[in-house]
Every structure is written in structure tokens, then in C-alpha cells.
Amino acid sequence: MIMSVHSLRIVKKLAEKLSVFLLLVAVVGMIVWWRRDDNTQAVLKNTNIPTDTQKTAQSTKPISSPGFNKKQYSVNDPASIWVVVNKGRILPADYVPANLVENMNLRSEPATALKSLINGAAKDGLKLILVSGYRSYTSQKSVYDSYVATQGQAAADTFSARPGHSEHQTGLAADVGASSGKCQLDKCFGDTPEGQWLAANAYSYGFIIRYPQDKTSLTGYDFEPWHIRYIGIDLANEVNKTGQTLEQFFGLPAYSNYPADYYQLKTGS
Ligand SMILES: [Zn+2]
């Protein structure tokens, strides 16, 4: 069979059209494949989001730093900056801190730290003041006895420490307030800008809110947003990170009430 010149031209044209068509199919195919790859990556990205969130949630669990030495200082020596005083742990009646800074009524270390804290608040436009620092066994006794006389012992025990059981006798505790006097030594201090600043920043100066709102059954005291306890920056960071009370952090018993027998804290122990 002999093809005419005319039919050869038709075949050539068809071949040209076919190759253009094939090229188009290839290009469209590549684009579709590429888009599919994009979608796959997007799906992978989406599945990564909950994984990351889970990781973040795990890292905020209340676990103290692995290298942190919980025995660095004594919790039983009244002179130790880590001493734990509560309803079950009593200070010697004659214990007086050695290095009280007179104009601040605190030991020298917390006095310096409190000055920094007050300066830090001032930089954020808030004026904090020291309301009350060191109280001797005798002065705590008269404070507590006057509350018992007016409100009865059960009520007094929820907000005032019996003599020997007050952190104020260590010279490491401070009651702070706003210079305006608003909500002074009142729970509403926690809602003031000064109280909120204190709750958020005290730890970075070595203090903790010792009687938090959600730990009253563990501390044995009502919420005291104004009462801060100096424990040093290292421990304050750890306690802040774990969200525990001092007792929980050190694995010590919690006393919501006064027990029949007290643990006697001793100098040098
Ligand atoms: Zn206090």
C-alpha cells in the first residue's frame, strides 16, 4: 500500500497534535502530584500540633529540677533560711535571729532581697511597703492572745499563729502591702495590682506566698496574699515551678490544726 503525500501530511499533523496532548497530560499530572504533596505536608503539620501541645503540658508537671539538692540547708534549724515552721513545728521560745536589720525588722539577707523586690515593683509603677517583719515570741503571744480574747481560739487559729509557730519569729517572713494602704492585711490585697504583681514576681527575689489560696487545708492558714517568706532564689524558683507548699516540697507532714505533740526545732540541728 502506497501512501499519498497528502495522507503523510495528515499523519504528521496527528503526531504533532498527539505529542502536544501528551505534553499537556504530563504537565497537568506533575501539578496534581505536586499539590498532593503539599496537602500531605499540611496534614503532617496538623498532626504535629497536638503532639507539641502534649509535650508542653508534660514539661509543666510539678517536678523539681533533677540536680536540685534538697538537703543543702537544714529545715529544722531556726537559723537556716530553709527552716520550716508551722502548726506542728515549734521554734524555741528564746530564739531571736542573730542578724536583724533594725530599720527593716528582717534578717539581713531577706532585708536586701525585699529592697530589690520593692525596687522591682516600683519599676513596674507599683508602690509596695513592708508592713510587718520580725516579731518576738513575746510579741506574737500578745498578738495571738488578743485575737483569742476577741474572736475565740478556733477562729484565731485560722489566721494567727500561736507563739513559737510564727514564721515572723525567724526574721525571714514579711507582710507587705500597697503604699496606698488599700486592702492591707486583707484577702482583697490579692486582687489589687500590687498583690498580683507580688504573686507573680516574689519568687524571683527569693520569696514565696507562704499561704496560698488553694492550699489552706495543707498550710492550716487562710489565704494570705500579703505574707511572703524568704527561702532564697534557688529554692523559691523550685517551689514556684512545682506549685507545692514548703511542706510538700520537703516531704514534711502538713498540719491543718495543732497536733498534741509539736516537733521542736533546735538551733544547730
Ligand atoms: Zn505574716
Image: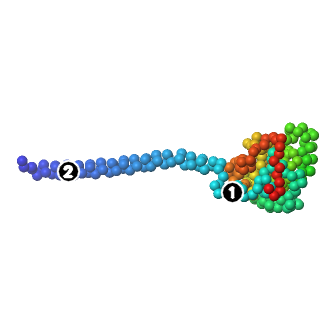
Question: Is label 2 in a helix, a strand or a loop?
Answer: helix
- The picture places residue 173, in percent across and down from the top left corner, at 82, 53
**Residue at which label 2 appears:** 15
Quarter assignment of residue 171:
bottom right
Q: Is residue 185 left or right of residue 33?
A: right
Depth check: give the residue in front, 120 or 60: 60
Q: Residues within 10 Å of mark 2 (few under 14, many from 20)?
A: few
User: Which amino acid lies under the numbered mark 2 shown in the image of this protein?
Assistant: Ala
x 28%, y 51%: residue: 23
Q: Is residue 65 left or right of residue 76?
A: left
Q: Tell me, yes or no, whether the two marked residues, 1 and 2, touch with CB atoms within 8 Å.
A: no
- The picture places residue 138, in percent across and down from the top left corner, at 92, 50
Depth check: give the residue in front, 154 or 263: 263
x 89%, y 49%: residue: 140
**Residue at which label 1 appears:** 69
Depth check: give the residue in front, 207 or 250: 250
